[in-house]
Image (spheres, helix red, strand yellow):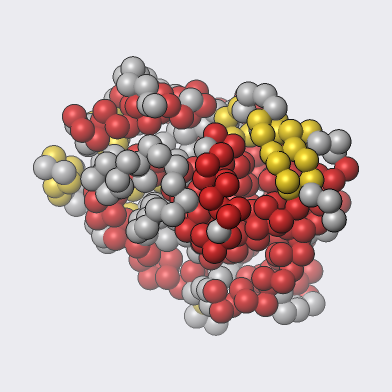
Amino acid sequence: MVKNTLPVEAITDPRTFTDPAALHGLLARIRTTDPLPYIQAEDYAPFWLVSRHADIMEIERNAEQFINAPRQAILPISYELKARAASGGQETISYMRNLIMMDGDEHKSYRNITQTYFTPKGLAGLIGDIEALAKEFIGRMDGADGEIDFADVAMAFPLRVIMTMLGVPAEDEPLMMRLTQQTLSSQDPEFQAEGGARKAMLQMYDYFIKIINDLRETPNETLASVVANARIDGELLADRDVFGYFNIIATAGHDTTSYSLTGGMLAFLQNPDQLAKLRADPALMPLAVEEVLRWTAPVKHFCRTAVRDCTVAGKQIKAGDYLLLSFPSGSFDEKVYEDPFTFRIDRKPNRHLAFGTGPHVCLGQYLARFELQSFFRELLDRVEHIELAGEPRFVEGSFVGGVKYLPVRYTMKQQ
């Protein structure tokens, strides 16, 4: 059941995203009454909220008219100013540029550096390693006396996958977890740190630039080395661009998958008939994972900027206007999904927007799918029974987020 009580400006409030029923009530009302409202909230640059699946798809596919630069997310103006001041007044782009900041041919050239690596064929050699890591992390539940914060397991597994690919040793993974949360989930008081997201990103820069320099001196066959030694037009990438690549893989590469795991587990616990259905028919796993991705939508929005005057959803958009693409809204659009507020693991087709679409579609989408399938498959193989053991808590964040605390009680199968 969704709650339909919030004003449209609440979409800018990070606390809105801690209550899925309230969030989806707001978005459902927007889709049916005014699917492209112009929002002027205090402390925010005005923007158009794009709520319908078809409009989001149209904008993402028309990358010449709707560009990623200069703004990728809608955040408070005061927050951005405070973060810049805390990092010595530096603009983020002075020390970091990643793929989501780029457009056109430049974006294509940088994406091509790892495009082949992240295809199903390119990742085939890693599947065995991912499955072994899923076995290792589900195995940690054996020693937890039948009760655990499931987020501890779900966050650690994709972190290890990604950090192994980037050459980060296991002992530094807690640092990477902290820095990721302080950047992507920095609106949440629990994850905030002195100096804000920019200072955390500068710490990450100092860490990865050492790895990058080492790999340039001694290349190897790893993904990290491919990025560190990549050339465009015969020239090595600038340090800020190489770091940007490491940054986007290190942060978006595990945080989003983690929230899909925790949110997916919560959905199974709240819909035990669907968990039983998956146990009875494991062949449904690929479809189940797509439904988990639709249901959780860990990336809450991306922003686009209109290049020229145009019309969207019957409204006049001016050049320079910002458009916020609401992925949770698009992935629950009643015109696309039958009974969208029902978690159904055999949903087909399932044209969710968790990975976006168009030229900026998520580079790591197949890796995320492999991880989710491996993890939930191992969970079903090893865990006899699992249930909620308390109230889950969600990230306060309008950009990236999901379930951050998920207490569970369980019994393991006898081996």
170 and 209: which is toward the camera: 170
356 and 28: which is toward the camera: 28
Q: Quadrant of residue 325?
A: top left
Q: Residue at x 13, y 40 (%)?
A: 315
| Residue 124 to residue 5: above or below | below
- Left or right of 214? Residue 28 is left
> Is residue 375 shown to the viewer in this render?
no
Q: Residue at x 62, y 76 (%)?
A: 124
Q: Residue at x 67, y 34 (%)?
A: 387
Q: Residue furthest bottom?
A: 234
- Left or right of 144? Residue 310 is left
- Left or right of 373? Residue 408 is right
Q: Position of residue 194 (x, y in %)?
A: 69, 28
Q: Quadrant of residue 166?
A: bottom right
| Residue 198 to residue 10: above or below | below
Q: Residue furthest front?
A: 280
191 and 29: which is toward the camera: 29
Q: Position of residue 185 (x, y in %)?
A: 58, 36
Q: Quadrant of the N terminus?
A: top left
| Residue 210 to residue 216: above or below | above
Q: Position of residue 59 (x, y in %)?
A: 27, 53
